[in-house]
Structures are given as C-alpha cells and as structure tokens.
Image: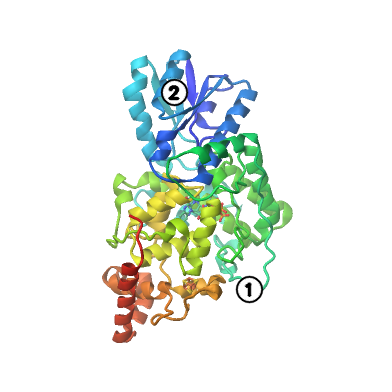
C-alpha cells in the first residue's frame, strides 16, 4: 500500500500526527494553497502572507529532510489532490484531523466526491497539536454543573505537572492575579518586539498577495512576522528572557504607540504548528526555575496557554453545531464601517483598529475590553462580529473564534463559558489605558455632547437586558446602580444610543 500525507496550512511541524504515523518513512507529501478557500471570507493580508510563506518554508524544510514534496497553488483542493494521488499511485492519504470543524467537512466531501473513485481513502489521524483530546475534554466536562475554565486549568496543572509541589499548586495558590493587571502609570520601559526581515520566499508571497484581486483586509506595507519554526522559537525565547518577568503586572494595560507591551506574540505561531503548547508551557516553567522569575507573571502566562487555549479548543469541540448561531441578547445591529477603516472619533477604537489594520494583532484586553465590549454593549450581531474577528486577526481560526467571540466576548451563548458578560463603561478603559487623554469624548460623561459612547451604550445595555442580566448573580450590584439613576438621565441615555446607530454608517 502506498501512503501519502496531506499537510494543512495550520499543521506545520514534523511531529504532527499524520507524518508521525508514518514513522521515519519518506512518504510523498502534498501541501496546497487554495484560492477558493480564501475567497470564502476576507482575510487579513498579513495572515495570507504568514500562512502561505510558512507553508512554503516548511515544504523546503521537508525537501531538505529527503521528503518528496508536492506544493500546489490551485483554485481548489480537489484537483491537485486527485492528480497527486494518481501520479504517486497512492491508496491512502493521511491527514491530521483539522482543528476547525468546517475543514473536516471539506475533507469528507473530497473523499466522497473525488478520492474514493481513485481506489484511495483518506485516513484522518487524531490531532496532536492540543494537550487534551476531544474525548478527554468530554470526560472532564461530564456531569459538571458548570464548565468554568478555572477548574479545567487546575486539572491541566496536575495532569502535566506544571507549577506543582506534589499535589498542591506551587506557592499555595492556583492563581496570582491579585498581583497582576496593574494600570499603566508613568514611563513604561517596554521591551522591543521580536520582528524579522523578509526573505526571498516571503517577498514572493507578498508580491503574490498584492497581485490578488479577491477582497482582503488590512495593510501589507510592512510584514515583520516570523515564518519558520526557528523564528518562532526565537520569539518564544525572547519572550521568556526579556518579557515574561513583567508579563503579569501589565498584562491588561493599553498604551498609545505600544503595540505589544510584554505580551508573548506567539499565537500566530502556535496556531499554525510552528510551536507546540506543551513545549511553550514547559519552557516557561524552566525559565521560572532557572531565572527566578516572579511566580505571578509565570503562572499568569501558563494559565493562558495551559488553561485558556486548551479550554477554548476543548469547549469548541464539545458544544453543538448550533453554537455559532447563538444570540442570547438577540442583537442584530450591523457592524459600523469604521471596523474596516479605523476612522472613528473614539480614540480607543481608532488606535486598536488602526494597529490591527497594520499588523493583524492587538493584545487580549484590546480584543476583549475594547473591540468585543463595544460590540456587546452597542448590540452588534454576534455572527457579524465573529466573522469580522475572523477577517481581521492574523491568529484567527474557527476553533479559537467561536468560543472567544460568541462566548467570552459577547456572552451570546448565555453563560456556557462565563459567569457574567464582559461589559464595561469608559471607566475601565480610562483606568487601564491612556486612550481617553487624546479623545474627542469625555470618559466621565454619560450624557451631553461629549458623552463617551462606551458610557451611554453600557447603561443602555443594562437597561435593555435587565431581565436577562438579573439571572446572572454577579450582575446584581451593578443593576442596583442602574435603579438609582434618575429617569431623565436614563431617557437621555436611551436617546443617545438610538441616535448613534442612526448616524453611524453600517458595513452591509
Ligand atoms: C474577542 C477575542 C478574540 C480572540 N481571538 C483570538 C484569535 O483569533 N486567535 C487566538 O489565538 N486567540 C484569540 N484570542 C485569545 C487571546 O486574546 C490571544 O490568544 C492573544 O491575545 C494572543 O496574543 P499573545 O500571543 O501575545 O498572547 P499572550 O497574552 O502573551 O498569551 C499567551 C498565549 O495564551 C493563549 N491564549 C490566551 N488566551 C487565550 C484565549 N482566550 N483563547 C485561546 N488562546 C489563548 C494564546 O495562545 C497566546 O498566544 C481572542 C480573545 C478574545 C477575547
Ligand atoms: S473617552 Fe470613551 S471613546 Fe474616548 S478613548 Fe475613552 S473610552 Fe474610548
């Protein structure tokens, strides 16, 4: 029997399950850039370059290791795949199970419609790029009243023996967030980010993307992301030695002109297979032991990768197919045009979207407390918001988008993932950033000409959804504040919210 391996664009490492299943045998390999696939939605230009350049570099690496690699740029997957099967007399195509559910359907259709007629089958090998399998997550979730991340994370710490002292958490606590999340005060001496010069392969991809006529998002004047495993390891190493010590305290801070603060910037690499989550977590633990780094920073970072990342993937696989359609608050407003241009007088949104257009990345709190918070309180359709996030981010994939946007960001799942919505007024943004200093609006004003939209939308949101929010125990304190608001002020707030929607041009 002749076996061949099809490697998808987010599976770019030699330890991946389909290749590993062939042992050291130098089986034929195919990688396909499908233009049809990227026509399905607008993608950020930086993401197209990252994924295609990383695929081309990986193909070269495999060739150097002696593999017979076929690399195709084609309209769809079917034609190059069937040609390759025929030319190599392949009877079994092995592919690692894709992380994204829609791609599994694509593979199954390809087998039924094209590959089977060539007396060949497609064998799906379980994905080994996450630490918990679907079955293990289901086992953990079974019989639980709620699926909160914190308990899942603790299981992960024990299971992989990370920051443990026997069966107790190192230092006595599972979580050190009380020492983290400080506002940015005074001069912050942020370390530079690890960026890279483009090489000939990347330049070729940049020219190719620039020549495409399909709709895309964002800019491509300056592409500085790494595209190989060696570069991804450099970024990880840079983070562990230069940034991790201060990661915790300023994890949530946002500062104009500071693109990445102390964040790791590894999600683009983790999500295409250039880094493996276990090596990241173990490397952080090693750096903690060898360099005596602060536990609050190291634990905070490990919780992101061992906790949140695995949990988001596990939950995505666990929930039903209707999860993507959830809309707990029945929000239907269309996204405004400025999500595509950054042209808005709201300085926080202007800063964050402008950076996103430039590099396809903003950090977690900018995603959660600026972009999705505003989308939630202004009442944008969760499905449109999810689709926009998928468009705009360099690290976006279906598996990470659904639970983060529909669940965490918008509470559109009604609380499967979180115990209360991440909704906030300008107060939080004014405390955790310096955006409000350069803004046309007043972060303290709820009504009047200079009223900040985060304020009137926040109170309007609480007012509109009072009945549903009452059911979330953690909202009762804030709802009491709503009750003490004078009726006249509430009327003015409702009016401002309605008028904002009428005045703002929508992207439809
Ligand atoms: C609305 C919203 C949208 C998001 N969209 C994406 C996305 O498209 N792709 C993506 O990878 N992450 C997404 N996240 C999660 C998180 O914001 C990013 O992983 C993180 O900002 C990436 O930057 P970093 O590598 O510098 O992360 P750091 O802040 O340094 O964290 C380290 C790593 O932890 C992991 N991580 C942390 N939180 C999460 C999480 N909630 N879900 C999954 N992984 C997590 C990531 O792999 C990240 O690289 C989103 C979060 C929200 C609230
Ligand atoms: S005042 Fe409001 S809109 Fe302006 S930066 Fe602050 S939170 Fe954003």
Q: Which residue is mark 1?
A: 185
Image coordinates of residue 300 in percent, x first then y, are: 57, 59
Between 151 and 479, the residue placed more toward the observer is 479
The residue lying at 58 percent from left, 41 percent from top is: 275
For residue 421, what is the image quadrant?
bottom left
Mark 2 neighbour density, 10 Å: few (under 14) some (14–19) many (20 or more): many
Apparent side of residue 300 relative to residue 388 in the rendered image (left or right): right
**Residue at image point 26% right, 71% down:** 467
Q: Secondary structure beneath disc 1?
A: loop
User: Which image quarter is the C terminus in?
Assistant: bottom left
Q: Disc 2 to disc 1, how far (Cα)?
A: 56 Å
Residue 65 rendering spot, x and y as whole percentages: 64, 24
- Left or right, residue 4 beside residue 298: left
Query: At x 54% / y 70%, what residue is drawn?
Result: 435
Residue 140 visible, this orientation: no
Q: Nearer the viewer, residue 332 or 181?
A: 332
Residue 270 against residue 361 in the figure, above or below: above
Disc 2 target residue = 80
Q: Quick check: 69 above or below 335?
A: above
Res 411 → quadrant: bottom left
Q: Nearer the viewer, residue 93 or 53?
A: 53
Tell me, for residue 340, which label it has, or none: none
- How many numbered marks does the figure carry? 2
Position above or below: 494 against 287:
below
Residue 479: image location, x then y, percent: 34, 77
Tell me whether the residue at label 2 lies in contact with that at label 1, contact meaning CB atoms closer than 8 angstroms: no
Across and down, in percent, residue 247 comes to 62, 60
């Amino acid at each position: 029997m002749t076996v061949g391996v099809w490697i998808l664009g987010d599976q770019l490492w030699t330890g991946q399950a389909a290749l590993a299943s062939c042992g050291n045998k130098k089986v034929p390999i195919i990688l396909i850039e499908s233009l049809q696939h990227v026509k399905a939605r607008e993608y950020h230009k930086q993401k197209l370059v990252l994924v295609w350049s990383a695929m081309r570099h990986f193909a070269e690496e495999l060739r150097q290791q002696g593999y017979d690699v076929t690399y195709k740029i084609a309209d769809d997957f079917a034609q190059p795949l069937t040609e390759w099967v025929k030319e190599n007399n392949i009877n079994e195509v092995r592919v690692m199970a894709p992380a994204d559910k829609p791609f599994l359907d694509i593979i199954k259709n390809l087998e039924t419609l094209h590959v089977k007629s060539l007396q060949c089958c497609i064998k799906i090998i379980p994905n080994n790029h996450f630490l918990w399998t679907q079955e293990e997550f289901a086992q953990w979730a079974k019989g639980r009243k709620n699926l909160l991340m914190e308990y899942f994370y603790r299981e992960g710490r024990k299971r992989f023996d990370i920051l443990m002292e026997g069966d107790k958490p190192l230092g006595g606590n599972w979580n050190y967030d009380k020492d983290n999340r400080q506002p940015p005060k005074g001069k912050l001496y942020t370390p530079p980010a690890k960026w890279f010069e483009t090489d000939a392969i990347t330049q070729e991809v940049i020219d190719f993307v620039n020549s495409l006529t399909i709709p895309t998002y964002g800019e491509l004047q300056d592409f500085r992301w790494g595209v190989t495993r060696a570069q991804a390891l450099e970024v990880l190493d840079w983070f562990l030695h230069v940034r991790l010590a201060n990661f915790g305290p300023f994890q949530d801070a946002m500062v104009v002109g500071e693109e990445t603060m102390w964040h790791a910037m590894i999600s683009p690499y983790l999500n295409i297979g250039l880094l493996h989550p276990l090596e990241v977590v173990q490397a952080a633990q090693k750096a903690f032991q060898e360099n005596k780094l602060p536990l609050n920073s190291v634990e905070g970072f490990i919780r992101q990768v061992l906790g949140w990342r695995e949990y988001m993937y596990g939950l995505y696989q666990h929930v039903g197919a209707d999860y993507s359609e959830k809309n707990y608050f029945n929000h239907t407003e269309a996204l405004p045009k400025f999500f595509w241009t950054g042209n808005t007088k709201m300085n926080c949104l202007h800063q964050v979207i402008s950076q996103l257009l430039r590099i396809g990345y903003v950090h977690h709190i900018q995603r959660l407390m600026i972009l999705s918070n505003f989308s939630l309180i202004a009442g944008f359709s969760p499905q449109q918001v999810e689709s926009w996030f998928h468009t705009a981010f360099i690290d976006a994939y279906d598996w990470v988008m659904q639970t983060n946007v529909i669940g965490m960001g918008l509470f559109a799942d009604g609380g499967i993932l979180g115990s209360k919505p991440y909704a906030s007024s300008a107060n939080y943004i004014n405390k955790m950033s310096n955006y409000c200093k350069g803004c046309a609006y007043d972060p303290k004003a709820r009504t009047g000409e200079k009223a900040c939209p985060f304020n009137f939308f926040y109170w309007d949101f609480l007012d509109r959804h009072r009945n549903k929010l009452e059911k979330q125990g953690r909202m009762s304190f804030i709802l009491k504040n709503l009750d003490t608001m004078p009726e006249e002020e509430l009327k003015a707030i409702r009016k401002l919210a309605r008028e904002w929607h009428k005045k703002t041009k929508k992207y439809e």
